[in-house]
């Protein structure tokens, strides 16, 4: 009879060999897989099987190697598969879906030159349509004769749009609503469509667009190759897609595969009272604690003007993006920001606030589903552009930090907002203000309804980011040092009255009218109207300007910063953590201690180390 083995006993030689065999196999398999991953990382665009003209174009753009999503999605799409891809913001999804479409068109043109619209790319906003259209032009720079693209989102008359489509572009970029309008009117034919892309697919498939999508799907031939991309896709979207297009795509979920070394985004949240948001923002931007281009998200249009006027009180220059501005202006603002003309954009993220752009299970748990549905029906109103949106997909270049002045109302909206920084392997910071429940409604002049549930939303955000192996850390500002600036903040807030905000809003729209190309002819024929409009602008009630707020007196600057500044170099602001504030540390899964807004020392690689004080010119 075999003796039972004690734990410490050596297994008999034959048994040991039997145990070692599967181990060896496993090791070998792991080694092979690792090697394959390493080799895959080294793949070039040419090795993905792309046309040399496309390879030349990406090289011209400075793309050395394909990103993970490009390495995985392009070969699948080139094989003709439907792909549903979930990959993080800024990871290069645009090229991942545009290049295969272009390749398909180039391939067909070798044998068949009949003009036909073969590709339709649907995006949720007009800003994004513009960006994708530009990307197509860049990627087809070396085959421009063979590939034509059109976007349907410009402010042009139906006649102009018709003539644009009469040329039968190979690829059309549009929002679902505009695409359907053109198909319905007969201006666009999708009868020979081969490729359909839904970028920001969860949004494209969601509220408001569903009817357009269904109509479009009915007009398309069977067997259109479909690609869907987003950083936030849920299984519900997959079901919707299956329902509408009767397709069964290959699922590429790459969110897990971005290792920590890929993560160059640092996320902080600051628990703050409603008025302290203004104070902290004043400090951050006046003392230039954040270096580099910055995107500030606020909850609504009024608030965007208010913050802009508030900043103006301190001579902090910023520009605004909101749905009231004409699309051409919005696109121009984004372009100018990307060229470095502006450093701060204040964007109102109304779309997420009005519609709550999520379908997360947790939302339903809390019974908000019905509310969202209600908003979906009645939410579209006023002169706002429903196809406005800058938190999704827009490739703002080199954004150093995203500041959520007002927290979004959903975790997915947060993911997209912060995705405007740390793109394409760059570093970035996200800082979000969170109004604790006990402080909500305590400062009536600055209170805003959407912040009532900040803490609940933060908990959701932390959970959602945790699933992506990301974490948010608490950040505390030194109360004592902030206090010295409070009266200046109050002075500025008082000057930015409701009337001043209304006037600023009207003034901006008036300026747009004056600049409008469409109205140029009208004004030439009616000069009196033009001068009237100009005169109105001059009468506008502006926010009271207060000279004393323009500069920060030396006595207010922290000692260390003053020393550095007098040396003529940049310095650090030791907005140190207040110890008694420790009660929040470690909550919401943040491992580290509540960190001060200190930039001189601290952990190596802490992006806040680069927050420096520079004297404003
Ligand atoms: N292979 C590459 N090498 C270098 N840069 C790249 C590469 N692919 C894309 N980029 C750059 O990365 C940036 C982000 O790309 P893109 O806008 O396609 O990201 P995304 O994944 O679509 O982001 P979002 O989820 O926000 O829509 C762009 O500036 C793009 O030019």
Image (spheres, rainbow, N blue to C red):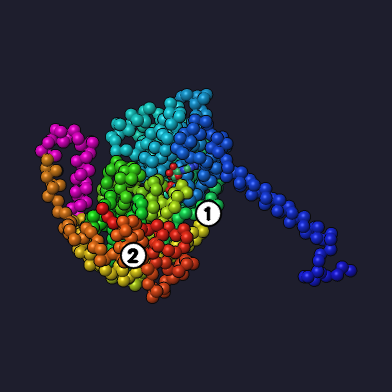
**Residue named by callout 2:** 560
The relative height of residue 380 versus residue 65 in the rendered view (above or below) is below
Q: For residue 141: magenta? A: no
Mark 1 vs mark 2: give the one in front. 2
Query: Camera-side residue: 153 or 499?
Result: 499
Q: Position of residue 226 (x, y in %)?
A: 50, 40
Q: Position of residue 323 (x, y in %)?
A: 29, 49
Tell how many labels: 2
Residue 451 visible in image: no
Residue farthest along the bottom direction in this orientation:
580
Secondary structure of the residue carrying numbered label 2: helix
Q: Which residues are magenta?
A: 502-530
Q: Assess disc 2: are there few (<14), some (14-19) or many (≥20) residues with their C-alpha within 10 Å of its C-alpha.
A: few
Main SS of the magenta part reads helix
Q: Assess disc 1: are there few (<14), some (14-19) or many (≥20) residues with their C-alpha within 10 Å of its C-alpha.
A: few
Residue in the picture at 39% in, 46% down: 397
For ligand 1, the image quadrant comes to top left
**Residue named by callout 1:** 261
The relative height of residue 436 versus residue 345 in the rendered view (above or below) is below
Query: Camera-side residue: 510 or 206?
Result: 510
Q: Position of residue 215 (x, y in %)?
A: 41, 41
Indicate the quadrant where residue 75 lies: top right
Query: Camera-side residue: 542 or 218?
Result: 542
First in sequence: mark 1 vs mark 2 = 1
């Amino acid at each position: 009879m075999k003796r039972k083995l004690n734990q410490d006993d050596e297994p008999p030689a034959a048994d040991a060999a039997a145990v070692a065999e599967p181990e060896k196999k496993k090791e070998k398999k792991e080694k092979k897989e690792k090697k394959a991953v390493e080799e895959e990382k080294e793949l070039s665009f040419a090795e993905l099987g792309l046309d040399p003209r496309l390879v030349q174009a990406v090289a011209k753009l400075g793309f050395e190697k394909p990103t993970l999503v490009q390495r995985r999605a392009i070969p699948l799409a080139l094989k003709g598969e439907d792909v549903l891809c979930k990959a993080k913001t800024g990871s290069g999804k645009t090229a991942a879906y545009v290049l295969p479409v272009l390749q398909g068109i180039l391939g067909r043109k070798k044998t068949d030159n009949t003009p036909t619209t073969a590709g339709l790319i649907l995006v949720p906003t007009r800003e994004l349509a513009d960006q994708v259209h530009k990307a197509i032009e860049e990627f087809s720079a070396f085959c421009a004769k063979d590939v034509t693209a059109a976007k349907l989102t410009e402010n042009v008359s139906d006649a102009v749009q018709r003539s644009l489509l009469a040329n039968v572009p190979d690829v059309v970029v549009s929002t679902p609503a505009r695409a359907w309008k053109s198909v319905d009117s007969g201006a666009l034919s999708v009868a020979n469509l081969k490729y359909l892309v839904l970028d920001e697919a969860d949004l494209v498939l969601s509220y408001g667009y569903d009817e357009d999508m269904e109509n479009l799907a009915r007009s398309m031939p069977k067997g259109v190759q479909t690609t869907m991309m987003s950083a936030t896709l849920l299984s519900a979207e997959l079901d919707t897609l299956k329902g509408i297009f009767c397709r069964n795509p290959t699922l590429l979920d790459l969110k897990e595969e971005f290792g920590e070394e890929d993560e160059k985004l640092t996320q902080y949240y600051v628990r703050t009272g409603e008025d302290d948001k203004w104070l902290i923002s004043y400090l951050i931007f006046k003392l230039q604690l954040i270096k580099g281009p910055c995107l500030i998200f606020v909850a609504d249009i009024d608030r965007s003007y208010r913050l802009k006027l508030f900043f103006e009180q301190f001579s902090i220059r910023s520009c605004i993006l909101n749905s009231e501005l004409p699309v051409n202006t919005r696109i121009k603002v984004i372009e100018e920001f990307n060229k470095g003309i502006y450093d701060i954009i204040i964007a109102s993220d109304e779309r997420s606030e009005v519609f709550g752009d999520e379908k997360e299970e947790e939302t339903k748990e809390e019974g908000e589903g019905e509310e969202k549905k209600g908003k979906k029906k009645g939410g579209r109103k006023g002169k706002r552009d429903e196809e406005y949106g800058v938190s999704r997909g827009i490739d703002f270049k080199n954004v150093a930090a995203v500041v959520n002045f007002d927290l979004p109302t959903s975790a997915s909206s947060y993911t997209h907002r912060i995705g405007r920084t740390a793109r394409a392997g760059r570093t970035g910071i996200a800082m979000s203000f969170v109004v604790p429940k006990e402080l909500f409604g305590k400062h009536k002049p600055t209170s805003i309804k959407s912040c009532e549930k900040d803490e609940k939303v933060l908990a959701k955000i932390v959970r959602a980011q945790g699933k992506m192996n990301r974490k948010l850390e608490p950040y505390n500002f030194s109360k004592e040092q902030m206090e010295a600036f409070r009266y200046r903040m109050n002075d500025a807030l008082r000057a930015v009255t409701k009337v001043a905000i209304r006037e600023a809003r009207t003034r901006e729209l008036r300026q747009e009218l004056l600049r409008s190309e469409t109205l140029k002819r009208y004004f030439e024929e009616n000069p009196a109207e033009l001068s009237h409009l100009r005169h109105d602008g001059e009468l506008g009630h502006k926010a009271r300007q207060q000279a004393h707020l323009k500069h920060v007196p030396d006595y207010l600057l922290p000692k260390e910063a003053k020393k550095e500044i007098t040396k003529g170099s940049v310095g650090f602001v030791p907005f140190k953590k207040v110890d008694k504030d420790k009660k929040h540390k470690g909550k919401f899964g943040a491992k580290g201690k509540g960190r001060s807004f200190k930039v001189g020392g601290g952990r190596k690689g802490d992006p806040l180390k680069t927050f420096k004080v520079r004297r404003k010119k």
